[in-house]
Amino acid sequence: MTRVPEALANANVQDESGNARPLASAWAERTALLAFVRHFG
């Protein structure tokens, strides 16, 4: 498995409720797939 750099793991993102949380919390309990989408508009 690839290791995630600490700076990226500690970056804050919004969850489905709009609350800020560290990105690493997405895979704290199980495997996660992350997709980054850029919005043009």
Image (cartoon, rainbow, N blue to C red):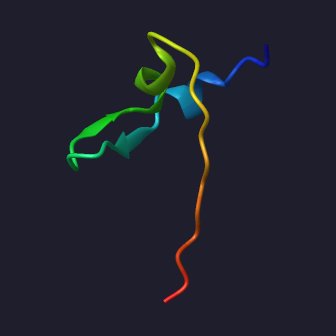
Judge left or right: residue 36 versus residue 10.
right
Task: State whether residue 33 is above or below residue 28.
Answer: below
Judge left or right: residue 6 versus residue 4.
left
At 39% across and 44% down in the image, what residue appears? 13
Q: Residue furthest right?
A: 1
Q: Position of residue 37 (x, y in %)?
A: 58, 62
Q: Position of residue 4 (x, y in %)?
A: 67, 23
Judge left or right: residue 36 versus residue 13.
right
Task: State whether residue 5 is above or below residue 14.
Answer: above
Q: Nearer the viewer, residue 10 or 41?
A: 41
Q: Quadrant of the N terminus?
A: top right
Q: Residue furthest bottom?
A: 41
Q: Position of residue 6 (x, y in %)?
A: 59, 22
At 57% across and 26% down in the image, what residue appears? 32
How many marks the image carries: the answer is 0
Task: State whether residue 18 is above or below residue 4.
Answer: below
Q: Residue furthest top?
A: 29
Q: Position of residue 19 (x, y in %)?
A: 21, 42
At 50% across and 20% down in the image, what residue appears? 27
Q: Nearer the viewer, residue 9 or 30?
A: 30
Q: Quadrant of residue 3?
A: top right
Judge left or right: residue 15 versus residue 36.
left
Q: Nearer the viewer, residue 22 or 35?
A: 35
